[in-house]
Amino acid sequence: MTNSEKLIYLIKYLLSERPDLGAADIPCGKEERFRLFRGLVNIRPPKPVSPEFLRVQDEFLQEELLSRGITDVRDMTRAERGIYLWKGDITTLRCGAIVNAANSAMLGCFQPCHGCIDNAIHTFAGVQLRLECAEIMRRQGHEEPTGSAKITSAYNLPCGNIIHTVGPIVNGGLSEAHRIQLESCYRACLETAWENGIRSTAFCCISTGVFGFPQKAAAETAVSAVRNFIKTHDIEVIFNVFKQDDFDIYKRLLG
């Protein structure tokens, strides 16, 4: 099958699981088809899937990854000792692990085609990621606490693993408790990476965006936590940003 035919197969499979959605026409354009595929993946609950679906999905996502391009941490220039600053799509980054800003359910974003990093990571990793997260949460028996971390496989992403953490939600004014919780996120992720032999970890801007943590304060907390950790651990950290204003904030703080 061509990649276009694989995408149509995946869409038809996902639609066949959802008779409640009624009949749906498959769009003609590639972008529209991918958006439909992504939306169906986003709303899919963690349940068994056929080996054939996984084979086609993995082939499709791997070809998509190659078309988007991969950035390797080894090709980056350090901003300071042990720390890199990179603006780009974290789902195309090859390093030991990337950090996902998860919610307390730890199952990914169920809002179709939402712009959050949790949605993107689950989309491009594949449906296996939600299945693994669901099994972790089933064994845990309760929602993930703020400031802790869990590690999973990365599946179709170029990184080695994904480390998931739940950041604090800031409603109203920023408190010292929020800063402590965010610092705990960075420390827990780094400790998890270190314990699993991972020596390069990429952080997104945890808790900013819809979680409401002010960008500058979040970056200050992140940089401080990382600098303290790498004083005693030989691990490299990439601060990954997607927006220019976040890049400018980190650039002023580093180096």
Image (cartoon, grey):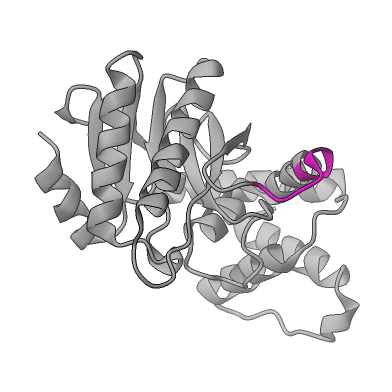
Query: 220 or 112, which lies in front?
Result: 220
Snapshot quadrant of residue 21: bottom right
Snapshot quadrant of residue 80: top left
The answer, for residue 205, to whether it is visible in the render is no
Image coordinates of residue 191 in percent, x first then y, are: 48, 24
Image coordinates of residue 119 in percent, x first then y, are: 56, 60
Residue at left 30%, top 52%? 218
Residue at left 59%, top 49%? 61
Badge count:
0
- State which region is magenta: 137-144
The answer, for residue 125, to whether it is visible in the render is yes
Residue at left 55%, top 37%? 162
Horizontal arrangement in the rendering, residue 249 relative to residue 119 (left or right): left
Residue at left 34%, top 62%? 174
Please determine whether, in this image, residue 34 is positioned above or below residue 62: below
Query: 107 or 11, which lies in front?
Result: 107
Q: Quadrant of the image for the C terminus?
A: top left
Q: Is residue 57 magenta?
A: no
Horizontal arrangement in the rendering, residue 55 relative to residue 124 (left or right): right
Please determine whether, in this image, residue 171 is positioned above or below residue 51: below
Image coordinates of residue 202 in percent, x first then y, are: 39, 37
Query: 76 or 236, which lies in front?
Result: 236
Image coordinates of residue 186 in percent, x first then y, are: 41, 37
- Give the residue at the far front of this rendering: 176
